[in-house]
Amino acid sequence: MMYFARWKQAAILAVCLFGVLVTLPNLLPRAAFPDWFPVRQVNLGLDLRGGSYLLLEVDTNGLLRERLEQLVEGARRGLNQANPRIGYTGLRAEPEQRRISLRVTDPAQREAAQRIIRELGQEVQLGAGQRAQDIEVTINADGLLVALVTEAGLRAKASAAVEQSIEIVRRRIDETGVVEALIARQGQNRILVQLPGVDDPDRIKQLLGRTARMTFHLLDETANLQAASPPPGVMFLPADQGEQRYAVRRRIEVDGASLTDARAGQDSRSGEWVVNFTFDSVGTRRFADVTRQNVGRPFAIVLDDKVITAPNIREPITGGRGQISGNFTVRSANDLAVLLRAGALPAPLTVIEERTVGPELGADAIRAGIISLAVGTAFVFLYMGFAYGLFGWFANIALLLNIVFIVSFLSLLEATLTLPGIAGMVLTLGTALDANILINERIREEVKNGRSPINALEAGYTKASGTILDSNLTNLIAMGCLYAFGSGPVKGFAVTVAIGTIIQMWTATVLTRLLVVWWYRWRRPKELPVVEKPRMSLRERLARPLFRLCPDVTRIAFMRGAVAGLVVSGVLSAASLLGAFYPGLEKGIDFRGGIIMEARTTGPADLGALRGAASALNVGDVGIQQFGDAQTVLLRLPVPAQEAQVQIVVNQVRAALEAAAPGIRILRVEAVGNRISDELFTGGMIALGISLFAMLLYIWFRFEWQFGIAAIVTLILDTTKTIGFMVLFQIEFNLTTIAAILTVIGFSANDKVVVFDRMRENLRKYKQMPLEQLVDLSINETLNRSLGTSMTLLLSTLPLALFGGDALSGFAWVMLFGIFISASSSVFIAAPIVLFSGRNRLRRGEPGAAGAVASQPGG
């Protein structure tokens, strides 16, 4: 273990150099590198550089309605045009049952009717090269004919619609000039859009929210526009502007899909803004035929079920060019041209989640993250150096490289660093030193037992390696669950912590060992600088520990308070559970839905005027409060009953605030619909449940079942008390605090694994010792390690609470409480459960205490 071949040393140094070289490009802007240079950098998330996050949902119900309308119109036309005409009654669409139905009046024509309807089917791709019709046509003995849209057909259409929508969304956003936009599919029918640098996404939301399906129809001039319902084959559509209504034939004469170009321009005669369009060859031919056959009749241009204009056809139009007029402004004409060039969406899109951060707030977040990271690093460096001397400074070098490796890994992945990701890096400062503390405490223990320096180093690294692996795997389990069921920036936190955990296992067990080997070969010391001496020179003071959190040898009888610890813990957990239901957790916007807007005025904010302006909109109870300084306010609004109304409410409130306080700047907007909030809450609860279950399985596999039961019961009690803390201090329960709870679970399991590992070792070492004394001995032996790791975590988390800002304060305070709870529960909950459940299994026929005392080391 304490020998490194030359090639191994070279390989370790090469890895360190590679990490530094990969990290360095992040110190310069991307534009500083030539195009041919293969630079990889960490991308800043929207919460750090500002921008908008939109989650869009494709309305697959609209696809079904449109398909059924096509079938109804196709059936009507096909049966009426058949020779001889096929008589029928009761033709209607039934969306709830995904079908259309009609009754054929003549039994002799049933087979012909079935054949005509079957020809309306469309072939869809089912996968693996299989194709099938999207409808099933049946007819019964009474002449009832049913055309059912199959589940597979609808699913294939929905999947194709999402893919097509992604491409159209990309084209529309590219037309607006937004650079580095991210458009990706999420789940079955959702599209994720990230727009860096866009702090007012209103125009883009309007562009994305319009289907832009343009069609050309003839009008039915004989229809009674005052009738309650249109005649068959006709639909009543409103005008795009004004109150006029048109009787539009359902038959599409020319489809907007045949357009090849659309540009905004000004009419040469009137000077008004118009949109000039051009058809492809198919559209040109069809447009010419229709206009030639219907001279003198009105011809409607329909966009998204609204009639833009309906001019009379004066003469055949054979050139394939046309013009759309309709009281356009320069912006609305350009927007319509963008929509027509990009193509029509196959189904409507709804914004179901929006998170927008202005660049000003992003800069504040970066500043808060850097300060937290710098202060946390300083705290942890000083603690390790003073508490563990030279070996602590070696650990600090490894910690510094640990941060470099995290950045280099994120750079290679071209990952996105978010504010929770920075919190993960700060937190890694504490967890990364856990392995070094384990090793240093082991080395110190072996020195105390009289081993030679080289043997103490060998035993320290060897005996600690298994515990390091076990304790860090529990943390990886928690982060894996968070990544699998988390959302957005919280996933960045999970990735950062997981990468840091894996790297620190290598830096602690390999890199610091190499530094120690180099030092040992250079100095050939007669004793290791791990124990304090009464009189030390300045040089020795810097090399040896200056203080200990507790004495090396303690004989605290923790198990005398076992019953009291379990009772107090049970009472606190029961009270916490009651508090979770009444008064209940303060759910954040992630889990309850709603709208949050953070704004900054030019002077001290007039809360009354702002509240009055927002309340006048009648959008529900409006909560407004000062947020930080006197110029910053936070508004909370309930989520509208219909998700489609969320964006309308956001735009109305934004306009009302700008009218009430001219010059106001919207720093942040978060809008989460009810379905999204329910999904996020369910995902968070699943992550907690699976994390606890996975840790139970792992600890049960690695240890005896008593340890597994003790661990899972303790973790549940730790979780409930953490929730009680959140209820007591009204800390928001959101995705960020879920991340904190999962991190607490990982750390708590880590701490228990260390104590359990020492218990297991002592069970083999002291076969005659009563279990109660053995449990006390194991806790006392690992006390410095447990307190040391808790201290490094506390020192790295405290700056987040002090300097991390409002976005991370809830996370930090939950972490600080969890550190305290986890450290105490290992002693007063987990250990007593092992004692009571293992008294007759881990120790059979315990001997008297006198024989046990003689076996105890240090007695």
Image (tube, rainbow, N blue to C red):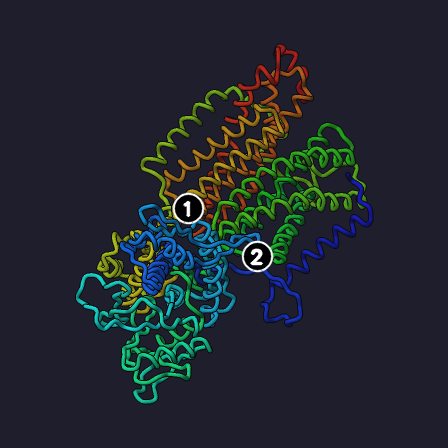
Identify the residue position indicated by label 2 in the image: 415
Viewed as shown, does residue 539 lie left or right of 333? Answer: right
Helix, strand or loop at disc 1? Answer: helix
Q: Is residue 835 visible?
A: yes
Helix, strand or loop at disc 2? Answer: loop
Residue in the foreground of this view, choosing between 125 and 11: 125
The residue that appears at 51% across and 37% down in the rendered structure is 690
Residue in the foreground of this view, choosing between 61 and 30: 61
Question: Vertical placement of 846 versus 52: above or below?
Answer: above
Q: Which mark is residue 703?
A: none
Question: Hey, which quadrant is residue 216 in on the image?
Answer: bottom left
Categorize mark 2 by other alpha carbons within 10 Å: few (<14), some (14-19), many (20+): some
Q: Position of residue 54 (x, y in %)?
A: 42, 59
Name the quarter where the C terminus is drawn.
top right
* Mark 2 vs mark 1, CA separation in Å: 25 Å
Identify the residue position indicated by label 1 in the image: 679
Viewed as shown, does residue 846 lie left or right of 198? Answer: right
